[in-house]
Amino acid sequence: MARSSRAEGFTLVELLVSLAIVGVITGAVMANFHGGQISSEVRLASDVTVSQLRAVQTSSLSGRLASVCSGGTNDLAVCETAGVTCPGGGTCAKRVPTGYGLHFNAGNATTYTLFYDTNGDQRYQAVEKLQDVPFVSSGNVQLTTANVGLPFDLTYKPPYGATYLNGSAGGASVVTLTLTHRNGTLSRHVNLYRLSGKIEHD
């Protein structure tokens, strides 16, 4: 029986078609991965923000002690942060502050500021700063809008956790923060219900 002399293998057209299919599949997988990463970061940012709001609210209900300067030229400054001193004869002492707050910065900010209200006005001053906190560690999620305007201060007053906006116990009954990924249009909302104290995200 005569054997065929035709060589087995792929033609150039078959090879190009195969490469094109592999390229399309790889592109789709990478696009899905990137979209999933964006969604995950925004979801994580909203989860962390809700947890932080609840922690601050709980601090006001429990009367968590803060380190604050008493007397001296830096009176009422928060001295809990490393490197902050109480000059002019002041001492760093533990006390229950008059409020536990979060200062939300202007639009497109990737961080917010935790602070203790030490002078009783339920507003943020630089000497009351505890620390800046990112919405997510990558820095890719930012606060784009809030229905109460930006920037603003949210403070919980002990011992009952009464909610203050920019120093006032009145105002909007619901505070809504919009968190958006910097590399896309994906957003989530964090909602704070002032009368009930409920905090949630969509």
Image (cartoon, grey):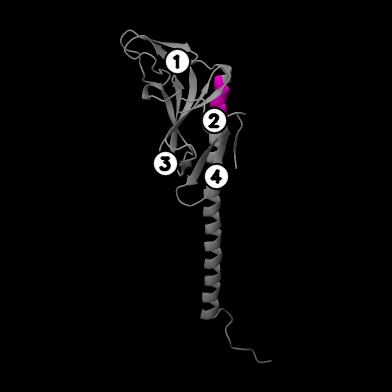
* Percent coordinates x, y for residue 183 in the rendering: 45, 51
Q: Which mark is residue 107?
A: 3
Q: Amino acid at mark 4?
A: Arg
Q: Secondary structure at mark 4?
A: strand
Magenta segment: 54-60
| Label 2: few (<14), some (14–19) or many (≥20) C-alpha neighbours in 10 Å | many
Where residue 149 sits, quadrant-wise, is top left
Of the two numbered discs 4 and 2 on the same chain, state the one appearing first in sequence. 2
Q: Is residue 57 magenta?
A: yes
| Label 4: few (<14), some (14–19) or many (≥20) C-alpha neighbours in 10 Å | some
Outermost residue, top side: 89
* Percent coordinates x, y for residue 59 in the rendering: 55, 21
Of the two numbered discs 2 and 1 on the same chain, state the one appearing first in sequence. 2
Q: CA distance from mark 1 to mark 3?
A: 31 Å
Camera-nearest label, 1 or 3? 3
Above or below, 67 relative to 171: above
Q: Amino acid at mark 3?
A: Gly
Magenta stretch: dominant secondary structure: helix
Q: CA distance from mark 1 to mark 4?
A: 35 Å
| Label 3: few (<14), some (14–19) or many (≥20) C-alpha neighbours in 10 Å | some
Q: Where does label 1 land, which residue?
A: 67
Q: Secondary structure at mark 3?
A: loop
Of the two numbered discs 1 and 4 on the same chain, state the one appearing first in sequence. 1
Camera-nearest label, 2 or 1? 2
Of the two numbered discs 1 and 3 on the same chain, state the one appearing first in sequence. 1
For the residues labelled 1 and 3, say whether their Cβ atoms are less than 8 Å apart. no
* Percent coordinates x, y for residue 60 in the rendering: 55, 20
Above or below, 26 relative to 84: below
Q: CA distance from mark 2 to mark 3?
A: 19 Å
Q: Is residue 138 magenta?
A: no
